[in-house]
Amino acid sequence: MNLSSLRRAQRAPAPASPPAPANPKQRDAFFDNAKYLAIVLVAMGHSWEPLRNGSRAASALYMFVYAFHMPAFILISGYFSRNFDLRPDRLKRLLTGVVVPYVIFETVYSLLKGWAGGDLSYPVSLLDPWYLTWFLIALFVWRVTTPVWRMVRHPVPVALAIAALASCSPDIGDDLDLQRVLQFLPFFVAGLHMRPEHFSMVRRREVRLLALPVVAAALVFAYWAVPRMNAGWFYHRDSAQELGAPWWSGMVMTFALFGCSMALTACFFAWVPGRTMWFTALGAGTLYGYLLHGLLIKGSHFAGWYEPAWLHTPAGAIAVTVIAAVVVTALCSPLVRRMLRFAMEPRMEWAFRSASAAGGAAKVVAGSGSGAGAAVPSPRALVSGVSGVSGAAATAPRASEPRASVPSQVTRPSS
């Protein structure tokens, strides 16, 4: 190399260093806060159930909370399922994060009912979810059908039509709790098609102010409706005929409750804080709180803890509410997550083919699509708060270009 070439090389700008990859575990505080607050409401609602007899106020609060706590939870689940497809690695996470916990906890709940309930002959049936485990099997069905709902032209109206037909079809039966799977389906589908700007919209100041009279009116209506309305409508687990109503009322109630639940869910999101709070980190453990608190709730029923008369006074109801909130908070803690990760988030590498084989299959699937594959959150993210990450597949660089890594971009809205 001569002197002039050396000088030109020294003047040439150095190639840019590749950008640092984004942190794949970056989280959005709003969604962690929303999931934690929703699971606290779930636990409170379950703790109020034995207190409803003889207390119109407790029954009204019960109906009010049941109108939106699970719809809000399911809508968030749908939002973080937006990019789900049938790639092998995603199916693996679906199996280990949803199916395996379902099998474990459906067995545990069935054994609890048989042993503590005094019926040792009660069977363990994976086809008939008992108590809380219906959500896991429903989540599995919803996630597997996500590509269909991404393809349908009018997904929410179609899902509402399916839910309405299910509500007047008593022959569906209890297998896999299909009534709940179908009747809660519109909330999941609505979440699938929500965008970050939707969450930003409901958090505006004017929406927060509007939420106050809406919630007040809902509470007044719930108090009025207690002696006039069957709370079973909010469970979405029975047909209209099974609730003692004419078949056509199932269709009417499906649309009425969907509108009511979406309005109250919007009010709930409007007041969820978007900044990091003391409980934000607990949003990552909501699956633990959801499945474990049910064991304590049912155990307290079997043990007769609700029998003391003072619990059925206003002071007793407040005490039960506080205890439920504290217990479910503890069950979402990192300590509990570390202790029970083997059941909730098992790796199970022994049950699947090697990563290289799965990766090859994934490339084939990705190559058959549009050329851009977006990574999605694991199934555990839907109920335990793992952040969703998406990335764009880069085209192969030319030989003359330096290779640069393409960082994943976090898709969480600032909601």
Image (cartoon, rainbow, N blue to C red):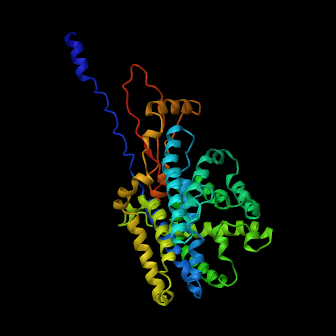
Q: Which part of the image, by quadrant, shows the N terminus?
A: top left
Who's the residue at 34% across and 37% down the image? 19
Residue 149 left/right relative to 3: right
Locate residue 415, reporting x and y percent.
Answer: 47, 59
Q: Residue furthest front?
A: 121
Q: Is residue 331 above or below residue 127?
A: below
Residue 379 left/right relative to 240: left
Q: Is residue 314 above or below residue 330?
A: below
Who's the residue at 39% across and 46% down the image? 24
Judging depth in this view, the residue of 206 and 285 nearest the camera is 285
Q: Is residue 217 above or below residue 260?
A: below
Locate residue 79, reporting x and y percent.
Answer: 55, 54
Residue 319 left/right relative to 158: left
Q: Can the viewer see residue 99 in this picture?
A: yes
Who's the residue at 43% across and 66% down the image? 273
Judging depth in this view, the residue of 184 and 263 nearest the camera is 184
Query: Can you tell which quarter of the image residue 63 is in?
Result: bottom right
Q: Can the viewer see residue 195 in this picture?
A: no
Q: Is residue 319 above or below residue 151?
A: below
Query: Can you tell which quarter of the image residue 16 is in?
Result: top left
